[in-house]
Amino acid sequence: MRKSLAAIALSCAIAASSSQAGIIDAMKIMKNNKPPAQPFDERRAPPRPNYRDLSNWVALPNTRDEADVAPLGVQPGDQARAAVDVFYVYPTVFFSQTDWNADVNDAAYRKQIEDTTIRSQASVFNACCKVYAPHYRQMTLGGYVKWSANSEAAVDLAYQDVRRAFEYYLDNYNNGRPFIIAGHSQGSRILRRLIEERIDAKPVAKRLVVAYLIGHWIEADWYRGLRDITPCQTASDVRCVISYSSFGEGRNATFQRLTLGKTSNYTPETIKRPYTCINPLSWTTGTGKAAKSLNMGAWVYGPGTRPRAPDVGMVSARCKDGALYVSKAAKIYEDLVIPFGNYHNVDYNLFYMNIRENALTRATAFMRQPR
């Protein structure tokens, strides 16, 4: 998996307070991920995807795709028999310095999505659910390096694609079934807006099992504006949101967040607010450390043609000030860590088997509720 997510760019902002090596790393990231020079213009955007076309879905339950994989020794789920769906939106894998939004017809872009995020994130849900994942014209990583009105417009275009895909999913695939929404980074940001505009306080909210909005800071105050959806507090809560952002022990995530807010879409009056965090090892929101013994298995597919087995007991974790602090992991995971101890790229991977079990737990809890 490439160091490919939005936090790479944002992490650069703290370079001034870090080591000389860190400053050099940050400067390289900034240089290699500049936003496009020309202003955003929707007339120059790639063609919008038609979701009637099966090729515009990177994962579907009735097709063979990378969402069907499972770690070595773990039985993939039988999606044909699943009682719950998942609508998954992948994170940033687009790095253009000339185009604001990705072309979903680009073969290299599609391959990058399949081999990274679908394998390592979307596949976690095949134990509980039928997996639906649309292609969308996501914003380039450079739009996060220097946030602007152009970034806002590019993200809005990406959101409109996802919203149309969600509408198509509801009208043509869902058939009134319970569903999970899940994303990471840019995907979580987009799904947050989808909750605000299309799910909360709408009839469809009654069918929402849970939202995994991982790798995106969600302030506690956000929930005050919602009617039906709350932050998850336990392992079996439903109609709630799971959010956390991972950092290495000994790092200062609060300082990073405040500094990075200067280039993000968080305004000065909101970046200091408390943020929510649920520990994916204990599924609690307290600050106590969850031991490595609770880690059912971290996982990355690995470089070979066959998947690796899960790495049981890989890291411990604890929530503090809205961040999830984790212990040092094995090299295959540490190689994906962003400078300054930001574990954003492995938010899912470090807790893969725990998330896999939890999605099944919440789906089961939802199905047992009185109708």
Image: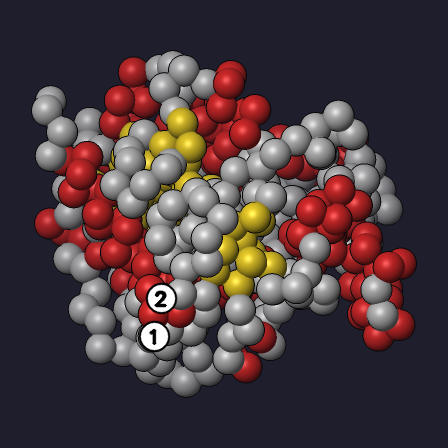
In the image, 68: left or right of 155?
left
Nearer to us in this view, 45 or 322 = 322
Mark identifier at residue 312: 1
Nearer to us in this view, 190 or 106 = 190
Going from N to C along the chain, the mark reached first, 1 or 2, is 2
Q: Amino acid at mark 1?
A: Val
Residue 91: in sight, yes or no? no
Query: Considering only vertical position in the picture, is 140 above or below 68?
Result: above
| Residue 88, image x, y percentages | 40, 45
Colouring convention used in this rendered image of the protein = secondary structure
Residue, disc 2: 295
Which secondary structure lies at badge 1?
loop
Q: Amino acid at mark 2?
A: Asn
Task: For label 2, count other residues whose C-alpha is less than 10 Å away and answer few (under 14), some (14-19) or many (20+).
Answer: many
Residue 289: in sight, yes or no? yes
Do the residues bearing badges 1 and 2 touch, measured as CB atoms within 8 Å?
yes
Nearer to us in this view, 111 or 2 = 2
Which quarter shows the C terminus? top left
In the image, 364: left or right of 171?
left
In the image, 367: left or right of 214?
left
| Residue 297, image x, y percentages | 34, 70
Mark identifier at residue 225: none
Which secondary structure lies at badge 2?
loop
Residue furthest to the bottom: 304
Write the residue at 29% across / 57% down.
356
Picture quadrant where residue 233 is located: top left
Query: Considering only vertical position in the picture, is 121 above or below 368?
Result: below
Task: For label 1, count other residues whose C-alpha is less than 10 Å away and answer few (under 14), some (14-19) or many (20+).
Answer: some
| Residue 298, image x, y percentages | 39, 69
| Residue 214, image x, y percentages | 49, 47
Write the residue at 84% across / 64% down.
18
Write the residue at 49% across / 48% down.
287
